[in-house]
Image (spheres, helix red, strand yellow):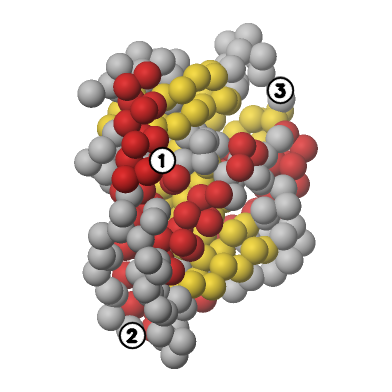
Amino acid sequence: MSSPRAQADPTASPLVIVHLFPDLLNLYGDGGNVKVLERRALDRGIPVEVRRVNHGEQVDLAEADLVFLGGGPDREQRLASEGLMGMRDDLHAFVEDDGVLLAICGGYQILGHEWLLGEEVVKGLGLVDMTTERAPGGSGNRLIDNIVLRSPLASRPVVGYENHAGRTHLGAGVQAFGEVVSSSGHGNNDDDKRDGVLYRNVVGTYLHGPLLPKNPQVADALLARALERRARRTGLPAPALGELDDSVENAANGYVCQRLNVG
């Protein structure tokens, strides 16, 4: 983004982004998603406060507008899951009050009823009607590839990279984040060519990259919803998101689409 940064109003209540457990869940640079959200808000003159909450620390989600959960290795995902289970009621209230939650890979799996740690089935948060199951052949049978989706959150294709062993299945009537339109990539599982989940203002996905730098329309969809949450929380009006110069981001997106033969 090369647009000049607008001046933020120092008296305005900031948009609050909570990054949960960045010390544990930051595979493939997933924390870059938070940096993109912060930058795209600041470039429009919207004040932002990023609260990075490490494992064992406390946070009041009633003050949050957007929560981010990344992915992590098995041991770190287990530790993060234990910490998140202690926050389950607060997370449930946040989601049902239309707080915005972006969860990537392992963070996405934890949102469901159960997920896998090697051969062990682990109880999830149950925030979304979905289950992650063991792959045929065990954890060595991974879905690894570049991937392109069509998503209701963006008019442009959504591009990313997946690397996961679990197979996620959504409950009846639960909407996916996107349909896989590339010949490479699988998404949630081997069968249905869908990736991720959309539930209220929850977006879960297997797409690393990180996701948002090459998909600015998805970033803005999340920001718009987070600003609506801030408006309800503070009484401030939710500003319209002005256009930014996304020529670099769109060129990167287009390059991936061209490589994968997606028009």
State left or right for residue 199 relative to residue 131. left
Q: Residue at x 36, y 18 (%)?
A: 260
Q: Secondary structure at mark 1?
A: helix
Q: Nearer the viewer, residue 9 or 196?
A: 9
Q: Give me the residue at 61% from left, 42% from top.
A: 29
Nearer to me, 92 or 164: 164
C-alpha span from label 1 to label 3: 34 Å
Which residue type carries mark 1? Lys
> Where is residue 212 shown, x and y percent of the image?
44, 46
Label 1 belongs to which residue? 214
- Spatial separation of the CA atoms under disc 2 and disc 1: 32 Å
Q: Earlier in the sequence, mark 2 or mark 1?
A: 1
Residue at the far top in the pictured view: 137
Dividing the image into 4 quarters, which one contains the N terminus? bottom left
- Which amino acid type is marked by label 2? Gly
Residue identified by numbered label 3 = 119
Percent position (x, y) of residue 157?
29, 34
- Give the mark toward the camera: 1 or 3: 1
Q: Residues within 10 Å of mark 1 (few under 14, many from 20)?
A: many
Using residue 215 as the reference point, say whether residue 85 is left or right of it: right
- Dot 1 or dot 3: first in sequence order is 3
